[in-house]
Image (cartoon, rainbow, N blue to C red):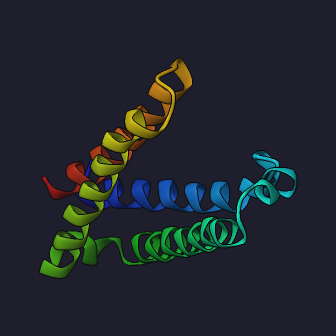
Amino acid sequence: MSAERFVLAAGAYHLALGVFHLAFWKLFHWREELPKLSTINRGVLQVLNVMLSYVFFAVALGQLFHAESWTTSIFGRVALALMAGFWLLRAALQPLFWPRTTLGWGICGGFLFGAALHFAALT
């Protein structure tokens, strides 16, 4: 598979994660769960989630509509390496902050997959 195809796959990955994060309110019953937090923690959690969704959508758009630039320009290659690092760090944090269950390890694998997409686009 060509480097550009890996970038396109990474764009689809980020698009899916952006949509997934916007579904957190329903998926995790935030209407009932978030009021248990302090006002500040409730706000921080929601704002960080919205902003992370924005980042996922922005990266997805860049990757889906400018895949070649991600593989041929120095900026794009640095961005690929940074995104690979993002997903590696997220995978490393998974067992520290989530239960070490089959689901937790599966989610960790999903983040390693995201890192692999970006590393593959660099080769």
Rendered view: 92 above or below 43: above
> Where, by quadrant of the figure, is residue 92 drawn?
top left
Expressed as whole percent of the image width and height from the top left, the position of residue 26 reads 82, 52
Seen as rendered, the residue at the extreme front is 38
Relative to 52, residue 34 above or below: above
Q: Is 34 on the left or on the right of 41, as rendered?
A: right
- In the displayed structure image, the side of residue 19 where residue 123 appears, left or right: left
The residue lying toward the viewer, choosing from 45 and 64, is 45
User: Could you tell me residue 49's position as x and y percent?
Assistant: 60, 66
Front-most of residues 5 and 36: 36
74 up-or-down from 90: above or below: below
Which residue is pictured at 17% across the width and 72% down the height? 78
Residue 76 picture quarter? bottom left
Q: Is residue 81 above or below residue 103?
A: below
| Furthest residue in direction top, as rendered | 102
Residue drawn at point x = 42 percent, y = 77 percent? 62
